[in-house]
Amino acid sequence: MMWTKGPLWPSSVLLLLTLLLSPINAGVGIGAYIAQWPEKIILRPGHSLTISCYQNYSNLAYMFWYQQPPRNGLKLIVSSSTWSHNSYEDGYSEAKFEVTRQNTDYSLMTIKNVTAQDAATYFCQLFFGSGTKLTVIGENDEIIPPAVAIFSPSKQEIQQKSKATLVCLASGFYPDHLTLVWRVNGVKRTEGVGTDESSTQNGSTYSLTSRLRMPAWEWFNPLNRFECVANFFQNGTTASINKFIHGDAGE
């Protein structure tokens, strides 16, 4: 089997660096499994980060680590195997990105003395998992939670298309490390949901918008509760702000 260092593109590359210590399970084929953690983390300059990668497909002897800076493509950092020294690409070194591989199943990469230039999403690759997104904030930067608001559907959309779209806006937060989730009557809703691919920067803070589209009849039920949940990083853990609106009773 031929092996190359060319990038194998992930099915999705989304995440930033806030701390979620549950492993990521990415299905990569029958009998194959890859997990990478932490999922997200925020660090201040000068700290270090260790990313863990586990895979159960022991026939694959090579392990690759990639970096994807914001709004850029994947860059290969290093390739490792179980029988030879790590091979670093130009611009990367073991002094900064230390990779250890105890066996074919498990690999660690430690990013030392992080700076703002290290803010990126990092992937271990045999198959791609979800990645680890790192955000580096200033030593004195304040973490600002979002303000969350839900906006009612447009009457014109209801009349013309028999559809109703709720809009959830999270604004004024810092850093860019927030996700939005919709729940209907307490149950997570993914159908009809559209969320901006990335946050919008407004000066020193960010905003993010998500939309929930549904049949008009679902909106015109006052017993239905539509909830937008903003999850963000605060004081070393994930915090949430919930806003909700009930369906319209109609005229």
Image (tube, rainbow, N blue to C red):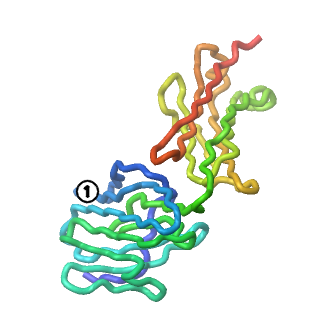
> Tag 1: residue type?
Ile
Q: Dividing the image into 4 quarters, which one contains the N terminus?
A: bottom left
User: x, y percentage for residue 111?
Assistant: 41, 71
Q: How many marks?
A: 1
Name above or below for residue 216 compared with residue 208. Answer: above
Left or right: 208 in relation to 86: right
Q: Residue at x 45, y 44 (%)?
A: 237
Residue for badge 1: 30
Going by the image, does 95 lie left or right of 156? left
Whole-percent x, y for residue 27 in the image? 33, 54
To which quarter of the image does residue 167 belong? top right
Compare residues 27 and 78 and report the one nearer the observer: 78
Q: Quadrant of the C terminus?
A: top right
| Foreground residue among 182 and 99 | 99
Q: Give above or below for 183 relative to 132.
A: above
**Residue shown at 50% from the left, 57% from the top:** 42
Q: Is residue 169 visible?
A: yes
